[in-house]
Amino acid sequence: MRAVIQRVKQSAVTVDGRLVSNIGMGLLVLLGVADVDGPQDVKFLADKIIGLRIFEDTAGKMNLSLMDLGGEMLVVSQFTLFGDCRKGRRPSFISAAPPDRAEFLYETFIDHVRQSGVIVKTGVFGAMMDVSLINNGPVTLILDTRA
């Protein structure tokens, strides 16, 4: 699994001009699922993201996690995170999981984060979405369970 994590002041997802989800202070997680991913990747990545200490404490140091802050998470599926652009000019998505498997692991990831007590909002799996955000920092991290 691969995730692009952005610390945000706010973020929102719209589909066909209609607001689907929005959050205030928290994390926007763009989540891609590889064809080799399984439940162990879901648990590892969800726990890692929940515990990342990337929010500032009173001294201005990145020392607080999403749990410490009581922030929200917006999770958006993004198979293009597994686009391979090494050959030619059109990305190959051969290493991305098939949609049914990707959706299952995406939903499993969301459930795992919710079980930890984090408020989770989502995009619409497989839809063409417009994602807006105000990146706080900016802070953007990339996590990959295979790296």
Image (cartoon, grey):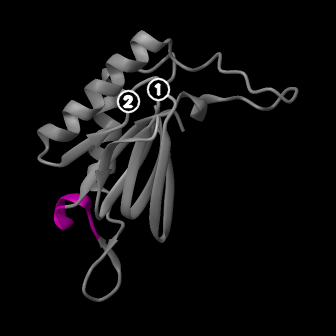
Q: Which residues are magenta?
A: 64-70
Residue at the spot of label 1:
127
Rate crowding at label 1 as few (under 14), some (14 to 19) or many (20 or more) other CA atoms within 10 Å: few
Q: Nearer the viewer, residue 6 or 21?
A: 21
Amino acid type, residue under disc 1 in the picture: Ala
Please give the residue where the numbered disc 2 appears in the rendered image.
124
Can you give x and y, in whole percent of width and height, for residue 45 in the image?
Answer: 35, 39
Image coords of residue 92 (percent x, y)? 72, 21
Q: Quadrant of the C terminus?
A: top right
Q: CA distance from mark 2 to mark 1?
A: 6 Å
Q: Position of residue 7 (x, y in %)?
A: 40, 62
Q: Using the rendered image of the protein, determine whether residue 38 is visible from the camera's viewpoint.
A: no
Q: Residues within 10 Å of mark 2 (few under 14, many from 20)?
A: some
Q: Is residue 142 above or below residue 124?
A: below
Residue 135 belongs to magenta span = no
Q: Nearer the viewer, residue 123 or 16?
A: 16
